[in-house]
Image: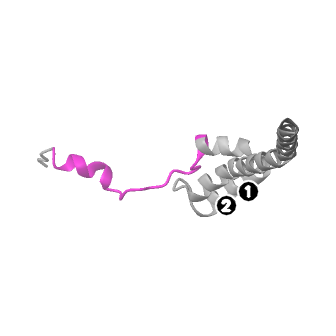
Amino acid sequence: MKTLGILVVIFLVIIGMLALIPLAAMGVSIVFSIFCLAVWFLPFWIIATSDETTGFEKIAWLLAMFCLSWFAWVFYFFLAPIKPRRRHSQYSRHSRYRDNYDYDY
């Protein structure tokens, strides 16, 4: 009688584990789907938070990402910004050399 009880318990455990396989597969598929969605949105997030482009150019890159997907993201890293911005004042290029040279005009 004791052996029959142990066999029933083992059978129920095996049936329970088989019933958990679809639930585990569904959980893994949900996690994988969320991961794929996050990877797909990553280029949008990088472009939206980037300091390389501003204003209309950033909107154009985001629209290109939406229409062309990963190709636009690769082009963004090679081409952005389209027009170089002036980040310093007009005298900053020479201001560090001004003190090093003695001007005798």
Q: Is residue 70 magenta?
A: no
| Left or right of 18 in this view: 73 | left
Callout 1–callout 2 Cβ contact below 8 Å: yes
Residue 94 among those drawn in magenta = yes
Q: Amino acid at mark 1?
A: Leu
Report whether 74 appears left or right of 23.
left
Q: Which mark is residue 24?
A: none
Say which of 89 and 38 sits in front. 38
Kind of residue at disc 2? Ile
Magenta segment main secondary structure: loop
Around disc 1, counting alpha carbons within 10 Å, would you say few (fewer than 14), some (14 to 19), or many (20 or more)?
Answer: some
Q: Secondary structure at mark 2?
A: helix
| Secondary structure under the numbered disc 1 in the rendered image | helix
Spatial CA distance of label 1 from label 2 is 6 Å
Q: Quadrant of the N terminus?
A: top right
Give the magenta part as a residue range. 78-100
Viewer-proximal residue, 11 or 32?
Answer: 11
Seen at 69% across and 51% down, the residue is 38
Residue 21 x, y percent position in the rendering:
83, 43
Q: Residue at x 28, y 49 (%)?
A: 94
Residue 50 horizontal/vertical position (percent): 55, 55
Q: Position of residue 45 (x, y in %)?
A: 63, 55
Per the rendering, the mark at residue 59 is 2
Determine which quarter of the picture holds residue 4: top right
Image position of 53 (left or right of 1): left
Could you classify mark 2 by the number of other residues whose Cα lies within 10 Å: few (under 14), some (14-19), or many (20 or more)?
some
Name the residue beneath numbered marker 1.
63
